Amino acid sequence: MSLFQKSKAKTRSAVFLAAALSLSACATSQDVASRSDGINDPYEPQNRKVHAFNKGFDKNVFRPVSQGYGVVPVEMRNTINNFSENLDMPGVAVNSLLQGDLRGTGLATLRFVLNTTIGLGGFFDAADELNIPAHDTNFGETLAVWGVGEGAYIELPFLGPSTQRATAGLVVDFFTNPLTYNTIDGDARIIPPTSKGFAALNDRERFSDSFDSVLYGSADSYSQSRLIYLQNRRFELGQDAGEDIDPFAADPYEDPYAE
C-alpha cells in the first residue's frame, strides 16, 4: 500500500470514527425516552419491516445454506471459526486498552501471537491448549465503559438486533481493526468478511433449534428477538437486565401488527 493509500485509509477511518461517536453521543440523550418496560424502540415500525426482511432471508437463504454447511466435518468448521476469531484479536486488544483493561489487552495480544505462529495462522487454537483464557470485547462495549448510553433499539439488515451504541461500535470496529481492508491489499481483503460469513453459518447451524424457536415458534418473533438480545447484551456488559426489562409489561407473544 502506497503512502497516499495509507493516508486515505487513515482519513476514511477517522471520518467514520467521528460519525460513529456522534451517533453514540445522540444515543445517550435518547435513553431518557426509554419506556417503562426498559425497552427504547421509537423506530419499531421500521424495525419490524427490517425484521420481516431478515426473517425472509433466513427462511429462504441463510437457514438452508447453514443446513448444507452442517454436513461439513465439525473439525473443519472449527478451524475456520478459530481463524475468524483470531482475526478479531488485534481489535480486541485495542478495545481492551481503550477500556483500561490491561489484562484483557495482554490476553488478546498473547492469544493472537500464539495462534498466528504455533496455531498456523489461527486455524488452530494453540492458546486454548496452553490454557490461555479466551477474551472478547468490541467498541460497543468500549462506548459503554465510557458512559455512552445504549440508545434506541435497531434491527439491521442481515445483521439483526442491535442498538445505536452497538451499531456505532460495529462501524468503528470494522474500520479500525488492523486486519480489515485498511491494511490488507488485493484479493486478500475478502478473507476477513468471508471467514466471518462461514462463522455465522456455523453458529446458525449449531444453534438451529434456538433460532427456529424464536423466529418461527413464537407469535411475535420481533418482540422475542428484541427482548432476548437486550437481556443478553446488558448481561454481557455487567448490567442487571432483570431490572431494565420487564418481560411481563407487555405480552411478548402478542403481535400488535398482526392482521
Image (cartoon, helix red, strand yellow):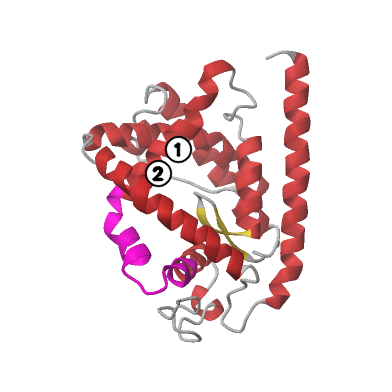
- Percent across and percent down for residue 94 are 62, 40
Mark 1 vs 2: CB contact within 8 A: yes
- The quarter of the picture where residue 124 lies is top left
Magenta span: helix, strand or loop, mainly? helix
Please give the range of residues in magenta: 205-226
- Percent across and percent down for residue 211 are 34, 59
Left/right placement of residue 55 relative to residue 173 reads: left
How packed mark 2 is, by other alpha carbons closer than 10 Å (few <14, some 14-19, many 20 or more), is some
- The quarter of the picture where residue 166 lies is bottom right
Q: CA distance from mark 1 to mark 2?
A: 6 Å
Foreground pick, 173 / 39: 39
- Percent across and percent down for residue 212 are 31, 60
Up the image or down, 2 lies above or below 173; here it is above
Q: Is residue 100 visible?
A: no
- The quarter of the picture where residue 189 lies is top right
Q: Residue 196, which numbered label?
A: 1
Up the image or down, 54 lies above or below 232; here it is above
Magenta region includes residue 121: no
Looking at the rendered structure, the secondary structure element under dot 2 is helix
The residue that mark 2 highlights is: 200
Residue type indicated by callout 2: Ala
Magenta region includes residue 219: yes
- Image quadrant occupied by the N terminus: top right
Residue type indicated by callout 1: Lys
Residue at the location (66% across, 51% down)?
168
Left/right placement of residue 201 relative to residue 28 reads: left
Residue at the location (59% across, 69% down)?
45
Up the image or down, 178 lies above or below 23; here it is above
How packed mark 1 is, by other alpha carbons closer than 10 Å (few <14, some 14-19, many 20 or more), is some
